Amino acid sequence: MSAVLDDPFTQALSGPQRRFARSAGRIRAFERDVSVFYGHPREMTAQDYADLARLGGVGHTVSLRDRRTPLPDTGFEFIERFDLVQYEGSAVAGVADPELVVLGPPDVAEMTALVELTRPGPFLPRTVEMGTYLGWRDADGRLMAMAGQRLRLPGWTEISAVCTHPDARGRGLARRLVAAVAAVTDDEGARPFLHTTADNPARALYESMGFVLRSRVDLEVLRVTGE
């Protein structure tokens, strides 16, 4: 069933990735150096907002996905809103690729540099622990493209951090990497899904591979002010 995709952060944090979870009341969050996302009820109470502030901590940012209740008058500062789309990839054909390499903790500095250059989304020092990450290195050994697994839900695994260095674009590396991560996901008995911004030109690539638009997502980033 794809219903778990409606609230993937909570599903991951209360299920397959609970080892990374912090919690306060009904609010869940990843450890700070793993991921920036928070799981929460869509209908938030005053207590839920208090727990969100406590779990986030004054001065830190928190995220809200598809919020349906008004924010409190105090305690939070609005920072940014992202218009996202969610794709499910039940029909995507995974293809193993022997030219790609498995990335791990020793590669985090290079991975972070590539993410900072291309900005596919958040990538923290321990994000690599969330799943299998694959990369492509050029003849000089430089990491030029990568993609990996982020959220893990019952029956589903998110493909994330799809990025290619500007000097290596136009070679089909993103397609190869997404297909290879999908193959790993399939071998694990799960189906792939992904999120991207609504205005991302890469949507055409994902759709050509068989990903199907499932929903639109409103993601807000707030700073906890404590007052």
Image (tube, rainbow, N blue to C red):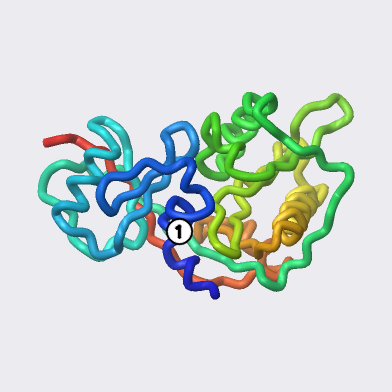
Q: Looking at the image, which residue is at 78% across and 27% down? A: 142
Q: Is residue 9 above or below residue 30?
A: below
Instruction: Give the image location of residue 99, x and y in percent.
Output: 88, 42
Q: Is residue 14 left or right of residue 175?
A: left
Mark 1 secondary-structure assignment: helix
Instruction: Give the image location of residue 161, x and y in percent.
Output: 61, 45
Q: Quadrant of the C terminus?
A: top left
Please name the residue that numbered disc 1 is placed on: 11
Q: Is residue 33 above or below residue 153?
A: above
Q: Looking at the image, which residue is at 67% across and 71% down? A: 90
Q: Dot 1, crowdedness within 10 Å: few (<14), some or many (≥20)? A: many
Q: Quadrant of residue 76?
A: top left
Q: Is residue 125 above or below residue 213?
A: above
Q: Looking at the image, which residue is at 32% across and 38% down? A: 61
Instruction: Give the image location of residue 75, x and y in percent.
Output: 15, 41
Amino acid at circle 1: Gln
Q: Is residue 169 above or below residue 87?
A: above
Q: Is residue 52 left or right of residue 20?
A: left
Name the residue nearer the viewer: 23 or 221.
23
Q: Is residue 62 left or right of residue 225?
A: right
Instruction: Give the image location of residue 47, x and y in percent.
Output: 16, 52
Q: Is residue 71 left or right of residue 93?
A: left
How many numbered tags mark residues here? 1
Q: Quadrant of residue 213?
A: bottom right
Q: Looking at the image, which residue is at 70% across and 37% down? A: 165
Q: Quadrant of the N terminus?
A: bottom right
Q: Is residue 80 visible?
A: no
Q: Is residue 109 visible?
A: yes
